Image (cartoon, rainbow, N blue to C red):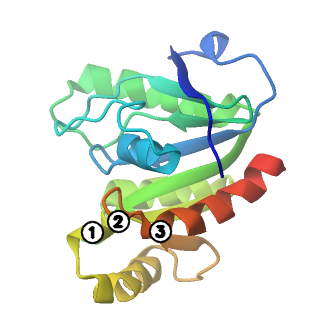
Amino acid sequence: MIIKNPRFEISAVKPSQYPNNNLPQIVLVGKSNVGKSSFINTMLNRKKLARTSSEPGKTRQINFYNIDDIFYFVDLPGYGYSKMSKQEQIKVGNFIEEYLATCQKISLIVFLIDIRHSPTSNDKLMYDYIIHTNSPCLVIANKADKIAITKVDEAVYNLQSALNPLKDLTFLPFSAERKIYNDAVWDFISDYIQA
């Protein structure tokens, strides 16, 4: 996909702040520091559209990125970040749940997990939520550059076996460093943008 003018549009913490149009929304979920912002930048071939940080827990609001007035990438705060106060964790958790439960324009959930590690208990909770709500979902096994290229397929298979034994979701590798995986991800997402 050729992207001409992607832009950050708004940060939101409640429904009245969500963009008021009918563009489909591709929503990114995953634990803190799993690489959601880097995923956006890599897919759009931009270096700094989505702010990245080596420090987890930087995203504290729902960030909407307008992609050529065709669709949104929606970056949700990561879960499992322990340095956030309990009160703040509850607050962030509540507005994430409200968004996922009430937004009618979610076309696809892109669920990022770290290819190097077994799914965490929080990953399993997110997976259960996605399955329970019957949401369309693509699982991204991110940070594939951190393992040998010959081991990527096996690692993806093992993650799917651990998280999705029925194998009824699509799992794809991804890397902000190795751009070889971008096309397969775009091919999958494009169906949900058109729909």
Q: Nearer the viewer, residue 20 or 194?
A: 194
The residue wearing badge 3 is: 181
Q: Amino acid at mark 1?
A: Asp
Mark 3 closeness class: few <14, some 14–19, many ≥20 residues within 10 Å:
some
- Residue 70 visible in rendering: yes
SS class, disc 2: loop
In the rendered image, the vertical position of residue 25 relative to residue 137, given as above or below: above
Relative horizontal placement of residue 148, taking residue 137 as reference (left or right)? left
Asked whether the residues under the numbered discs 2 and 3 touch, taking CB atoms below 8 Å apart as contact, a structural biologist would say: yes
Q: Nearer the viewer, residue 156 or 94?
A: 156
Q: Residue at x 23, y 82 (%)?
A: 148
Residue 22: x %, y % from top left: 81, 28
The residue wearing badge 2 is: 178
SS class, disc 3: helix
SS class, disc 1: helix
| Residue with the most extreme top position | 16
Instruction: Identify the mark at residue 145; answer none if there is no mark.
Output: 1
Q: Amino acid at mark 2?
A: Arg
